[in-house]
Image (cartoon, rainbow, N blue to C red):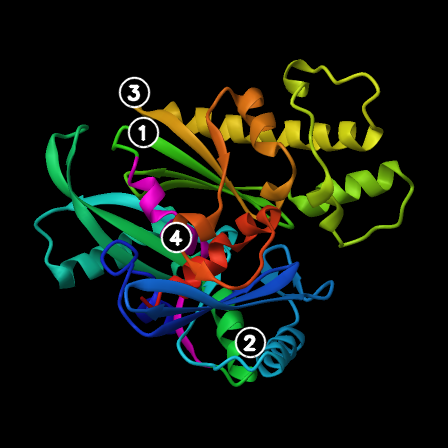
Amino acid sequence: KLFQKKMINYLKNLLQRNQSGIGIELGPERINIAEICQKRNKLKLVNLVKAEVPEEVFMEGQIKDIPAMSSLLQSIIAENKIESGRITTAILGRESVTRVIGVPVELNDEELKDYMNEESSLYLPFSREEADIDYQKLGNILDLNDELEKVQVALVATRKEVTNAYIEVFSQAGLAINILEVSNFALIRTLKDLLKEYGPEEAVVIADIGFESTELSIVVDGIPQFNRTIPTGTYEMQSSLNEAMNLPVSRDTSKLLGMTVSIMETMGMTKSGESSETNILQKVLSELGDEIRRSIDFYLSQFENLEVAQLLLTGSGAGIGQIDEFLMQRLSLPVSKVDPIEILGLETEIEIPLEERASLAIVLGLGLRQF
C-alpha cells in the first residue's frame, strides 16, 4: 500500500523542510537523478546525474525489464556516490488517472473514504480491483449545476502492476522509496510559483515533450484539471528525420537540440532554400500543435468563462530552437519555454546548457518534494 500512503499531498505540503532530497526520474530514454540541499534559506542543486536507458527496458510508459532497470539504477547510485537517503520517484503521468471531482460537503473522513472507494470506479479505465488510488481534499466550491456547496477532491489512480513495478525496481537496487507520486505533480511543484501568477479564470497548459510522447496538463488555480497523452515525442521527430535521410533508426535525439524550427510555417509556408530536415521537423511539430489545439478546444468547450493564458513547454523537446515561437504562431497563444533552474532560484555549480534545462523540470520537482 505504499502508493496509497505516499502519494503526493501537493497542495498542503509542497515545501516540507528537510535537509536534503533526492529525486529519481525513470524514463524510456534515460534515468535522471537530482540531489537538492537546503542551506539556510537557499536551495542548491548539488548533484545531477543522467544515464541512458537501453532499448526495450522501458517502453510505452511502463518498465518492461525490472532487473535491467534495477541493475542500471544501482550502478548509477554507486558510481556517483549518491547517498540513498530520502528518495522521491514518480510514475509517468500517462500511466495514471487524475480527476478533480465534487463530493458532498457533509461527509466526514471515514464517509469520504467509503465514498471515494465506491465512486472511483466511475473514473477509471480499468477495474477498481486493479487500481491503487489516493485522494486529497482541495477546498469547497459552489456547484453551479445544483447550486450546492461541495468539496473538491483530487483523485489519483494507477494500476497496481505499474505501482508494483516501480517499487520492485528500487527494492532490487537496494533502495527505499520515501515518496512515490505521479510525474504531473512533480512538474507542477517545479512550476508552483509561476502558476500563482494566473487567476482562477485563467488556464495554463503545460506540454511536457518527452521521448515517447507529450504529456499535456491543463492547470487552473494550481490544480491539474485535464490530462492527455499525445503519442508524439522526440523519438518520432528523430525517426522521421532519419527515415527521410535514409539513415538507420537511432534512439539518439541529441541532434534535435542543435536544430532550429522555422517560424514561417504557420500558414503552411516554408522558407525557400530551407533544408529538408527543417521541413520534416516542421511537419511533425505542426501535427503536435494541432493535437494540442484539439485538446484545448475540447477542454474549453466545457467552460464559458475560462481562457487559456499561457502554454508552457517542458521536457527534452522544449530544447529545440524556436519551438516556442513556432507553436505561438501555430496556436495563436502565448508560449514560453521553462527554465526550472531560474524559476526555482536554485543555486548550482553544475554547468547545465540552456537547451537542456527544460528536461529537468520533473526530476527537480521530485527532489523538492522533501522540503
Name the amino acid, label 2. Val
Residue at mark 1 to residue at mark 4: CA–CA distance: 22 Å
**Secondary structure category for the residue under label 4:** helix
Name the amino acid, label 4. Leu
Indicate the position of residue 317 as horizontal and vertical percent values.
62, 43
In this rendering, is residue 229 above or below 121? above
Residue at mark 3 to residue at mark 2: CA–CA distance: 45 Å
Q: At 39% from the left edge and 34% from the top edge, which residue is drawn?
A: 204
- Which of the marked residues, 1 or 4, is nearer the chain's N terminus? 1
Residue at mark 4 to residue at mark 2: CA–CA distance: 30 Å
Q: Quadrant of the N terminus?
A: bottom left
Answer with the quarter of the image where residue 271 lies.
top right
Residue carrying label 4:
344
Residue carrying label 2:
169
Residue carrying label 3:
304
Q: At 72% from the left edge and 15% from the top edge, which residue is drawn?
A: 269
- Which of the marked residues, 4 or 3, is nearer the chain's N terminus? 3
Name the amino acid, label 1. Glu
Closer mark to the observer between disc 1 and disc 2: 1
Out of 371 and 182, give the one closest to the viewer: 371
Residue 126 visible in image: no
Farthest residue to the front: give it.
349
Indicate the position of residue 21 as horizontal and vertical percent values.
40, 71
Which numbered dot is residue 202?
A: 1
